[in-house]
Amino acid sequence: MTVKPTPLREQTRSVVRSLLARTAIELFAAKGYDNTTLDEVAAAAGISRRTLFNYFRNKEDLALSSLAEQGDLIAARLAERPADEDPWAALRAAFQVLEEIDMTAEGRLEFITLLFGNDSLRAGHAEKQARWQDLLAPLIEPRLPDTERGTLQARAIAATAIVCLQVANEEWVRLRGQADMLDLYDTAVQAIRRPT
Amino acid sequence: MTVKPTPLREQTRSVVRSLLARTAIELFAAKGYDNTTLDEVAAAAGISRRTLFNYFRNKEDLALSSLAEQGDLIAARLAERPADEDPWAALRAAFQVLEEIDMTAEGRLEFITLLFGNDSLRAGHAEKQARWQDLLAPLIEPRLPDTERGTLQARAIAATAIVCLQVANEEWVRLRGQADMLDLYDTAVQAIRRPT
DNA sequence: GCACTCACTTGCACTGGGTGCAAGAGTGTG
DNA sequence: CACACTCTTGCACCCAGTGCAAGTGAGTGC
């Protein structure tokens, strides 16, 4: 049974990672991102600052690690959709996975408020989500009709769906969470796909 | 004639700014963004590092200042379009202004390659363009049919158009500039707006 | 129990981005 | 010449991020 030789270490590692991210975000939300030093985060987590860098590439990564995971979740869900489903329906279904993430509406709101409150975090956020394209586009391309199939088209659809999600997200924050995010997403998609 | 009391200083300031940005980008392109210190940029421009910060908020701003200007140009052009023109046509027309910017294809390619070659620059790029939404959305909203008018809808359209431009941009780089950027943009928009 | 290995942790020193402050240089005004 | 005002600069400082080398601690074989 040596089929999986190293999952133990990696498993603990990812647990530690999410634990560190959690305490960091708590601090960021409480004191503000810029006003929180990595020394403080390390102290709060009971490790050295240097060790923090063994788990995260940089301060931003500490705040945004969950976004990369979300991208993976969406991609995985998208890959499971029936191959003949049209791209928009498949994407819409894949995005449902976001609602299943273990997080209260308050926690989500707090997190997004944190994101929007700082320039470099907003930038990192935008970029991380832009990288979702790289995951989703290859899964979109085979779903396009033969005459319209191409990398450019697939990327355009992936990017558009993601950006509609972002817009819905912003609106959701503006409404203080008093709406269903996917409803807002649907409204956004409808607005752009309606013929003029 | 004291109607315009301070344009002189501001004018010289913006000239200096673009001059500094130009030399900085030259250095970045030559040596790489990360391998170029602000001391070197300052030295190349003949000023002190400290003064550099009088003109730019940070290193990233030094590389990306042109993007903010482009956003202003697009917004200005969009505002000039006839009020009854539909949003997509107006946006498409506004984006034409990018082709008129004084820059060779090589220079453009060099600049975009610089952008894509560094994580934080890519992030800043994505964020700056995302902020174009704030400029464009208000100009889109009045162009929507009464039944579909709303901030969410306007932002969705602005964001989508911008992201299609980004995708077209990436493809344009992948093709080494051997294509018309707006043609690629049209293909992208067509791909998302075609009914499924 | 003991040496050995191997990964993880930590401290230390250093680079570079970014800021506050206060002194200096330049220019126009009375 | 004194002044006011702005722009520039040097200096000291904080913090993010990295390379390195030593320390720690949990297995593993003997």
Image (tube, coloured by chain):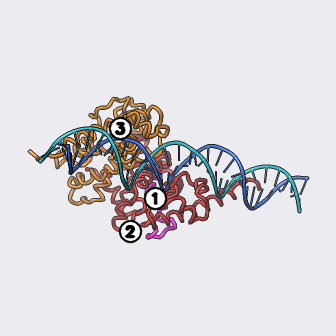
Chain colours: A red, B orange, C cyan, D blue
Cα separation, mark 2 vs mark 3, equals: 41 Å
Q: Disc 1 and disc 2: Cα gap in Å?
A: 17 Å
- Percent position (x, y) of residue B70? 29, 42
Mark in front: 1 vs 2: 2
Can you tell which quarter of the image residue A55 is in? bottom right
Q: Are marks 1 and 3 in contact (CB under 8 Å)?
A: no
Q: Secondary structure at mark 1?
A: helix
Measuring from the top left, give residue A166's x and y in whole percent: 39, 56
| Same chain letter for marks 2 and 3 | no
Amino acid type at circle 2 is Gly
Tell me the SS state at disc 3: helix
Comparing B36 with B140, the one in front is: B36
Report helix, strand or loop for mark 2: loop
Q: Quadrant of residue A16?
A: bottom right
Q: Nearer the viewer, mark 1 or mark 3?
A: 3
Q: Magenta residues?
A: A84-107
The image's mark for residue A95 is 1
Contact flag, marks 1 and 2 (Cβ < 8 Å): no
Q: Position of residue B59 (x, y in %)?
A: 41, 44
Does the segment drawn in magenta span residue B48?
no
Residues packed near mark 3 inside 10 Å, few (<14), some (14 to 19) or many (20 plus): many
Residue tagged by mark 3?
B21
Going by the numbered disc 3, the residue's amino acid type is Ala
Q: Position of residue B92 (x, y in %)?
A: 27, 42
Looking at the image, how many numbered discs can be counted on the residues?
3
**Could one spot residue A144 in this view of the protein?**
no
What type is the residue that disc 1 sits on? Phe
Does residue B31 appear in the picture of this structure?
Answer: yes
